[in-house]
Image (tube, rainbow, N blue to C red):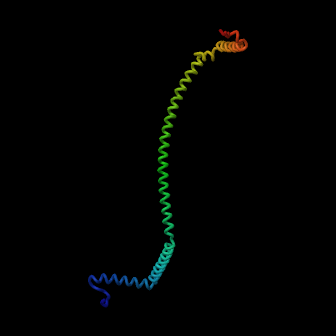
């Protein structure tokens, strides 16, 4: 018990002072109505949580787990199919890359050959332009062209005459 002046001596004195302060604080809060309000708020919060848990239980009970399991299995099948398709596509891309490298090499070789041919054609064109060879003469020498035209004309006349008068040119004797 507390002495009439309300003070204790020793170590218990500190504990008792703290307890007295706590009790005074609780009494003050009860008198102000703050503690009752907090209790009502906590009670309402617990009721709301209880209602929420009940609703969640109802929803969980309504879940079609077989459907979800089937959907998960379907997703797994789709993932496997995608993996297989990706692997096949990767293999096809690798094959295509190899074929492309071969094609590029062939195109490069063809380009080299075309370049060599171009050099040769250029050399031929230069000789023709310079009048070298029969073709060069034909391109640059009008007299050569006239002689060639004259020869062709004479050959045509000869062929016509052979057709008209074969006996002049061919003699056939039997024994």
Query: In the image, 144: left or right of 81?
Result: right
Q: Position of residue 52 (x, y in %)?
A: 49, 75
Which residue is at the far left? 10
Residue at x 61% of width, y 15% of height = 137
Q: Position of residue 74 (x, y in %)?
A: 50, 61
Which residue is at the far front? 175
Q: Quadrant of the N terminus?
A: bottom left
133 or 23: nearer the viewer:
133
Which quadrant holds residue 132?
A: top right
Residue at x 50% of width, y 58% of height = 78
Residue at x 26% of width, y 83% of height = 10
1 or 8: nearer the viewer:
1
Q: Is residue 49 above or below residue 103?
A: below
75 or 111: nearer the viewer:
75
Q: Position of residue 103 (x, y in %)?
A: 51, 37
124 or 46: nearer the viewer:
124
Q: Position of residue 68 (x, y in %)?
A: 50, 66
Q: Is residue 96 above or below residue 160?
A: below
Q: How many marks are shown on the rendered structure? A: 0
Which residue is at the far bottom? 4
Q: Is residue 47 above or below residue 156?
A: below
Q: Quadrant of the C terminus?
A: top right
């Amino acid at each position: 018990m507390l002495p009439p002046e309300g003070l204790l001596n020793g170590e218990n004195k500190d504990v008792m002072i703290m307890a007295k302060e706590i009790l005074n604080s609780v009494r003050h809060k009860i008198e102000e109505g703050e503690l009752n309000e907090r209790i009502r708020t906590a009670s309402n919060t617990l009721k709301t949580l209880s209602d929420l848990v009940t609703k969640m239980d109802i929803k969980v009970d309504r879940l079609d787990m077989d459907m979800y399991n089937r959907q998960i299995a379907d997703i797994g099948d789709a993932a496997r199919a995608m993996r297989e398709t990706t692997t096949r596509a990767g293999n096809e891309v690798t094959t295509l890359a190899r074929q492309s490298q071969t094609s590029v090499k062939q195109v490069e070789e063809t380009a080299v050959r075309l370049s060599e041919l171009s050099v040769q054609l250029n050399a031929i064109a230069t000789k023709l332009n310079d009048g070298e060879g029969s073709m060069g003469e034909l391109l640059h020498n009008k007299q050569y062209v006239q002689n060639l035209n004259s020869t062709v004309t004479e050959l045509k006349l000869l062929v016509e005459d052979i057709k008209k008068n074969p006996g002049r040119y061919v003699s056939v004797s039997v024994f």
